[in-house]
Amino acid sequence: MKLIPTSTTFKGWVGLGLFSVVTVGSLWDRFFRNPGYVLTSTDKWIISELAVSIILSAGMCIWYFFACRKGARDGARETEFNKYETGIAIFLFCWWIAGLVTLMDRNNEYAVLSNGLIATANTYFAAWASMGSVLYILGEISESHAETSSFRSPKLSKWWLLLASTIVIIIGCADVYMSATCGGFDSELCTETIVGLVTGSVGTFISCGSIIFVSFWEEKFSRLLESVLSLLFYAE
């Protein structure tokens, strides 16, 4: 019996650690190499957010490397490991949502400037890649859970990716809606932004419901229902 739920999750932890380090490196000059710069409370929050992400991902990689090689493969240890890994992944999912909101805020100018342009490509793309790594980990864990039951949905990871895409839509549209651009200066853009928010919200509801049903009530979540929800998502 394997200690880990699936070997592919290790790749996700490695990716999360690397992308988090890249994000820190891209912000290093701003935080620590400017003698006259004083860290704000927002700066300290971002530093702590990235530090926690790096520490937890590194810890999971160390567990994969050493605990498994020591032969700790009994059922009790495997179950305990699965619970810890799932809990950490869910925590980091919520943690990175909060971190992305701060990193992508135009007022902070970490990844996006006040005019909407990308401030630093490394910060912008590495931050989103970190979130993608967390979603990949959650998708693999959920899929491994589904594979141990009588109902096996090979599309569970895809639902997680759809959830990620809707989150991107919501965050992006919310950022535009709250900016000065959508304050009466461009009514057409405001209308499009509201449509984007509604689309992202509906998509999030559909994908979250599908993930929950597949993960916990597999026997009641028929392939027909999954197909219908997929079509609704496509139409939406």
Image (spheres, rainbow, N blue to C red):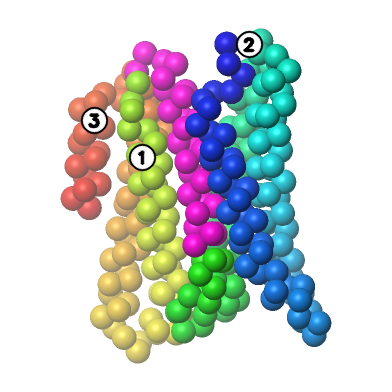
Closer mark to the observer between disc 3 and disc 1: 1
Looking at the rendered structure, the kind of residue marked 1 is Trp
35 relative to 127, above or below: below
Residue at the spot of label 2: 75
Q: Position of residue 126 (x, y in %)?
A: 54, 59
Q: Which tag is nearer the camera, tag 3 or tag 2? A: 2
- The quadrant in which residue 218 appears is top left
Q: Give x and y (percent) for residue 105.
A: 54, 72
Q: Is residue 193 visible?
A: yes
Viewer-proximal residue among 125 and 94? 125
* Contact? badges 3 and 1 (CB < 8 Å): no
Q: Give the Cα separation between the discs numbered 3 and 2.
A: 34 Å
Residue type marked 3: Leu
Residue identifier under label 1: 159
Q: Which residues are magenta?
A: 125-151
Q: Residues within 10 Å of mark 3 (few under 14, many from 20)?
A: few
> Going by the image, does 226 lie left or right of 86?
left
* Mark nearer the N terminus (1 vs 2): 2
